[in-house]
Amino acid sequence: MTSISIFAGMHKALRFTRISFLHFALFILSLSSVQGLRAQDSTIDITSVVQEVELIEFNNLFTQNVGSESAKLYWNSIRGSESIMLRYKAKSDESFDIIELDQKAIHLELQNLQERTDYIWQLGAKTATTTLWSKEQKFTTEEGYSWYSILILIGALGFFIYGMKIMSEGIQRFAGDKMRQILGVMTTNRFAGLFTGFLTTSLIQSSSATTVMIVSFVNAGLLSLRQAIGVIMGANIGTTVTAVMVTFLGFSKFSIASYSLPIIAIGFPLLFMKGDRTRSFGEFLIGFGLLFMGLDALKNAVPGLDSGIMMYLEPLTGMGVFSTLLFVGIGTIITVIIQSSSAAMTLTLVLCGKGLPFELAAAIVLGENIGTTITANLAAMIGNVHAKRAARAHLMFNLFGVVWMIVVFPFFLNGIDSYIGSTSLRSPLAADAEPQAIQWALTLFHIAFNIVNSLILIWFVDFIAKTAVRMVPSRGEDDEFRLEYIGRGILSTPELSVLEARKELSKFGAIIRKMNGFARSLIFEKDDKKKSKLNARIGKYEDIADRLQVEVDTYLAKIGEGELSDRSIRDVRAMLSISGDLERVSDLYYQFSKIFQNKEKKKIWFTPEQRTGLDHMFLLLDNASIEMISNLDKLNEPDLKPARLCEKTINEHHDKLKKKHLNKIGKKDYNIEGGMVYTEMVGLTEKVGDHMYEVSEALTGENTDS
């Protein structure tokens, strides 16, 4: 009978208050509470209970920063309740732990949780007549960090870097020579270099790849040191595009990682297409998908900065500028180990999502700007003196930027904090800052720092270049392409410029002598790897000689545009002829190396007598090159007698070797195929001797044919 009256009351309340089905369901949930009260007051107003229920709203309940022993729980403020509480338990437990909360509380951090455990939690709102609980929320704590966890973290980081590598290489191949043309057309305009570096890095998504490319271009002489510095500045700005892309696509509510496999599915068939550009675009898509899959794995592999880890970080903070310097050092070490500033920046963003404070993350980013210069410096180790200078300039640029930023560090962070705080996100410097706010603040800090640093230092390009030259002085190395004596700026007086060109040609002659030594070493070398290196060096030097001729001839043409004395006019004509002769000598040595490689492929062998004959020929050429360089170094007109004697000796030895070859043709034990290759090589060396003599001859004005 009592139950009938209760349901009759329910029907009456539903009819007169017109509550929805949802309200009815909430009422059923509170039925047990109403029945409990019936013993005290059998005349409960059901309508008032329903009205209380209507006022309670549980909105936006979620869990973040889940670690191995802690988790942060969030919700929106609740209206219509007298007090709120939270209860939680491990899924396997029978009873809840209940925590009374402040009425205005919107989050709570649970501590001392169990590792790798499923948890359930609910938010409760207490009214005058009952207590309502939200739907069950679930989270799982992470595993405590172990060696296995470290391996997972390294694997996730490798996954991310590999995806970045595939994406970068794919877009570079897709762009083809366009990328090289963009860098190759640089002029002395520092702002054009800045924009080019930004554009290139934005496209290939790797500042390290850009800086290594710049170093190689300086090594090849396609860019001067001043031009390279401008491009490096732009590359530093361009690397911020990666941070924006990762923050927007990797950490926002819309995560591109969910679409990584479909993106890879689109790129995979393109790998089997005929066109190179199509295949390269497929590689780019696959790399793009792998990058964000790696980012997703990285987010799951990085531990939460719960009380356990923060216990070790706490002593490192609170020391002002010393703490900043300490975390700058940490960022440098991380980037040196990872060898990718973009990957290091991404790792820092992930740590921000795990509870890393904004000010510590910003200091780590400053260190990453120093660490990223290591890649370029490592690449320059095998380059020439000018490549080393470009790498040092990169280091100086980033290092100076970090120094001035440390001075204004607190003010800069407050400026970023004010801007982010003016948006829909909360202050990143606040104790309860949202991870997303910290991530966007860090990205903005990265962008602002690199732009401001570039705009400041772009006016000091000449100073940076001069300092880099002092740091890496020239040692007279020839294994490079760079005009050592001829300047790229405004020409000096024409008469002095002639002397500069003469010195450059002397250096050109030294390069030719080295090529002669490489070719001679090939004759007796038995190790295949050493043979390959010698052939590669001859090819490199031939390429250097080609570009050196163009630069010298261009410079001489500019000299010819000025007012010259008769002597200087004759000297310019002679040097144009000498430049051509030296370039042709380099071509002959390169041709010799190609014939030698072909001989090795066909397994053609020389007799000991043939090797000795060729070796003597190269020895005579070395003597001739010494005489040629000596004449180039002389400011006065040289004496041709020693040069003529060298050329005569070379011709006589050539005729002697050729005659021996002809006499042995037809004999049973004579290898005709080897003999043909041998005489071809001997003929090339004789031509080299002729051109060397013509160089000395041109200095006297007797031969000025170019």
Image (cartoon, rainbow, N blue to C red):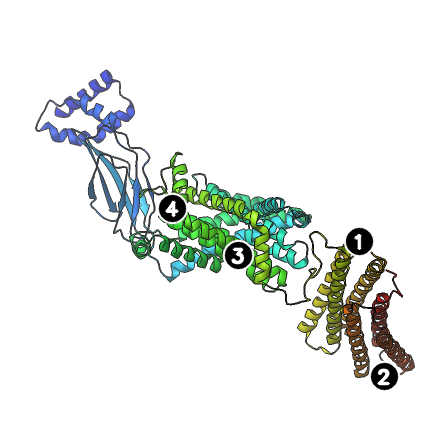
The type of residue carrying mark 4 is Pro
Question: Is there a contact, CB below 8 Å, between mark 3 and mark 1?
Answer: no
* Residue 420 picture location, percent across and down: 40, 38
Residue drawn at point x = 42 percent, y = 60 percent: 151
The type of residue carrying mark 1 is Ala
The type of residue carrying mark 2 is Asp
From the image, tell me which residue sits under label 4: 410
Sequence-first tag of 1 and 4: 4
Sequence-first tag of 1 and 2: 1
Where is 521 relative to 337, above or below? below
Q: Residue 273: in sight, yes or no? A: no
Sequence-first tag of 2 and 3: 3
Quarter of the image for residue 686 reads bottom right
- Locate residue 644 relative to residue 424 in the image: left or right: right
Where is 309 relative to 45, above or below? below
Quarter of the image containing the N terminus?
Answer: top left
Label 2: which secondary element: loop
Q: CA distance from mark 4 to mark 3?
A: 24 Å
Quarter of the image containing the C terminus?
Answer: bottom right
Quarter of the image for residue 25 reads top left
Question: Which label number is shown at residue 669?
Answer: 2
